Image (cartoon, rainbow, N blue to C red):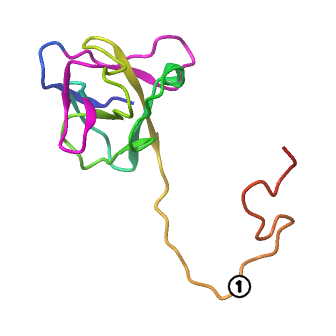
């Protein structure tokens, strides 16, 4: 599948797979700032034309777990109608310095199809073994 991508910054890097079989493609930082909500904001310098019926999901790199930072919205959802820059916002937390620098790989994007869902209101749901069991109900420790 081909996806149109536009460089908004001359230093932007077009995403590509690092290894055969990878699901995500790396995204790199080309700009840095702090927004009005006190988040570290990294721009990729890229905008995409994700086809209708598909969604772009942006995830932090797994190496983020070595820090106290986290991606503010956990997973970014890039809808097919969005044409703006792909950006990552990380919490500042109690740290005085950002976790990444310009030129670093800051996250990954996965583009995948999604079904169109139509909800139907009912007055009873089918029975299952789990039932209404919530957090921790499927096992012990």
Residue at 24% from the left image edge and 30% from the top image edge? 4
Does the stretch in magenta take in 17?
Answer: yes
The outermost residue toward the bottom is 123
Q: Looking at the image, which is closer to me, 133 or 2? A: 133
Residue to which mark 1 is pinned:
124
- State the predominant SS element of the stretch in magenta: loop
Q: Position of residue 57 (x, y in %)?
A: 42, 39
> In which quadrant of the rendered view does residue 49 lie?
top left
Relative to 97, residue 36 above or below: below
Task: From the viewer's perspective, tell me whether residue 19 is left or right of residue 109.
Answer: right
For the point 24% across and 25% down, the residue is 44
Q: With 13 as the anchor, is 126 left or right in this view?
A: right
Image location (x, y in percent) of residue 92: 34, 32
Q: How far from the left and from the top, in percent, is residue 96?
A: 31, 23
Residue at position x 38%, y 31% from top?
94
In which quarter of the view is residue 55 placed? top left
Viewer-nearest residue: 124 or 97 = 97
Residue 95 vs residue 18, the one in the foreground: 95
Horizontal side of residue 2 vs 134, given as left or right: left
Q: Residues within 10 Å of mark 1 (few under 14, many from 20)?
A: few
Q: Which quarter of the rendering shows the C terminus? A: top right
Asked if residue 45 is positioned above or below residue 91 in the image, the reply reads above
Residue 71 at x, y = what percent?
Answer: 41, 36
Magenta residues?
Answer: 12-41
Q: Quadrant of the N terminus?
A: top left
Question: Quick one: 59 or 3, which is closer to the camera?
Answer: 59
Q: SS at mark 1?
A: loop
Quadrant of residue 88 in the image? top left
Q: Is residue 13 above or below residue 5?
A: above
Residue at 54% from the left image edge and 24% from the top image edge: 65
């Amino acid at each position: 599948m081909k996806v149109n991508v536009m460089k908004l910054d001359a230093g932007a890097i077009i995403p590509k797979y690092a290894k055969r079989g990878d699901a995500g493609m790396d995204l790199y930082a080309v700009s840095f700032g702090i927004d009005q909500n006190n988040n570290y904001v990294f721009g990729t310098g890229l905008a995409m034309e994700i086809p209708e019926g598909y969604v772009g999901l942006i995830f932090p790199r797994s190496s983020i777990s070595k820090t106290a930072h986290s991606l503010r919205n956990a997973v970014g959802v890039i809808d097919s109608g969005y044409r703006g820059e792909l950006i990552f916002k990380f919490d500042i937390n109690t740290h005085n310095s950002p976790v990444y620098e310009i030129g670093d790989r800051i996250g990954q994007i996965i583009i995948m199809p999604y079904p169109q869902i139509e909800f139907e209101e009912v007055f009873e749901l089918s029975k299952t073994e789990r039932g209404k069991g919530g957090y921790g109900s499927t096992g012990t420790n």
